[in-house]
């Protein structure tokens, strides 16, 4: 029995899917130094599970980095694959998936992951080498394009069998709304339609930034981008211990981001008539669901934040069945 692991290292969140369960954590690391230890105390159990040693330094990963590190490093740099941040996030993801405590033997492990369309050509081989170096040269590594994960998730069932044979042979548009970026791709016959692609720098983080500014000017309370997520989830911000509803402040910001997405989509696909289905995915799809109804043949991918990673696993599973 093969162990198939999906890893989706987004600029905002890392998603890991395997027989060890689903893990989602912020793509953030920070030095695990005196300052962090002082704040949180030595006995914090998070340190056991969310630290990584790399190049003789100790780092905090994910939620712990957001909470305790005095400085943080984000994954969003130009040569991100070369950075300590990227390698720490990858190592932690592999560890969460259980590759270092597995009884399968490296030849029975399949790791599937994706790269953003813009990085695919330049980074694919490097990524395969990096993963093999971190785990074992004999394991199998498959790298695809990030938005294709959601495509496979939508079209394949849990057994890797195609759900809708007619639709999959059509022309499918995908909008992947992430934390820093939003990707638009068009797929036909399992291949990208080259002149119908786009990536925009805006993602949910730009909405959170605007909302953080509104909260500051309205209530005088400063919120970091990652904290705004929680405010949205809770629906309120606390001011002098009193809960203040944020719905009226959030609605116009989400709506204006949705209109931005709409106008980019319309440049690519016009009225959408030549596209057979538009899939909307990425974590941002959950937040924007009720604002994105401009095409009548839109489908929202369920549990969209993990759709890419779940799709990688389904795809790798279906390939194995045809081996
Ligand atoms: N159920 C939900 N409701 C509201 N927002 C959500 C939900 N699930 C995820 N999100 C938000 O969606 C955003 C995008 O998450 P996602 O994991 O897709 O980004 P990413 O892949 O890291 O980004 P990028 O594509 O820029 O690399 C995050 O801000 C996340 O908090
Ligand atoms: Mg993503």
Image (tube, rainbow, N blue to C red):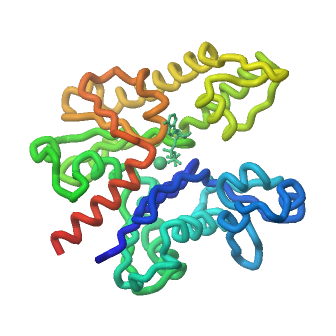
Q: Let me know if residue 101 appears in the view.
A: yes
Residue 302, position as x, y percentages in the image: 35, 39
231 in relation to 167, above or below: above
Looking at the image, the residue that sits furthest to the top is 248
Horizontal relation, residue 271 to residue 162: left or right: right
Residue 79, position as x, y percentages in the image: 60, 62
Q: Quadrant of the C terminus?
A: bottom left
Q: Residue at x 80, y 30 (%)?
A: 222
Q: Quadrant of the N terminus?
A: bottom left
How many marks the image carries: the answer is 0
123 in relation to 203, above or below: below
Looking at the image, the residue that sits furthest to the left is 166
Q: Let me know if residue 183 appears in the view.
A: no
Q: Residue at x 39, y 51 (%)?
A: 308
293 in relation to 133, above or below: above
Q: Residue at x 65, y 55 (%)?
A: 62
Horizontal relation, residue 199 to residue 215: left or right: left
20 in relation to 239, above or below: below
Horizontal relation, residue 77 to residue 44: left or right: left
Q: Quadrant of residue 205?
A: top right
Q: Quadrant of residue 322?
A: bottom left
Residue 184 or 24: which is nearer the viewer? 24
Residue 185, position as x, y percentages in the image: 34, 43
Residue 45, position as x, y percentages in the image: 72, 62
């Amino acid at each position: 029995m093969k162990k198939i692991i999906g890893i989706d290292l987004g600029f905002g969140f890392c998603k890991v899917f395997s027989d060890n369960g689903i893990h989602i954590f912020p793509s953030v690391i920070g030095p695990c130094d005196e300052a962090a230890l002082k704040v949180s105390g030595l006995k914090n159990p998070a340190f056991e599970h969310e630290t990584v040693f790399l190049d003789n330094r100790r780092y905090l990963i994910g939620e712990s980095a957001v909470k305790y590190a005095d400085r943080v490093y984000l994954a969003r740099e130009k040569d991100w694959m070369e950075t300590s941040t990227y390698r720490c996030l990858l190592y932690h993801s592999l560890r969460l998936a259980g590759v270092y405590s597995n009884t399968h033997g490296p030849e029975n492990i399949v790791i599937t992951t994706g790269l953003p369309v813009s990085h695919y050509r330049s980074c694919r081989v490097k990524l395969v080498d990096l993963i093999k170096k971190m785990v074992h040269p004999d394991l199998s590594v498959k790298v695809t394009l990030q938005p294709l994960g959601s495509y496979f998730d939508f079209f394949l069932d849990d057994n890797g069998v195609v759900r809708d044979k007619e639709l999959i042979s059509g022309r499918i548009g995908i909008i992947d709304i992430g934390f820093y970026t939003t990707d638009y791709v068009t797929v036909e016959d399992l291949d990208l339609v080259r002149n119908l692609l786009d990536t925009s720098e805006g993602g949910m983080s730009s909405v959170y930034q605007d909302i953080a500014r509104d909260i500051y000017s309205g209530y005088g309370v400063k919120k970091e981008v990652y904290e705004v997520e929680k405010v949205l989830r809770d629906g309120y911000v606390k001011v002098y211990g009193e809960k203040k509803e944020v719905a009226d402040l959030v609605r116009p910001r989400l709506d204006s981001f949705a209109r931005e997405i709409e106008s980019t989509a319309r440049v690519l696909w016009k009225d959408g008539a030549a596209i057979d289905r538009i899939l909307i995915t990425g974590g941002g799809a959950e937040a924007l669901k009720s604002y994105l109804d401009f095409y009548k043949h839109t489908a929202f991918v369920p549990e969209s934040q993990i759709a890419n990673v779940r799709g990688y696993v389904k795809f790798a599973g279906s390939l194995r069945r045809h081996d």
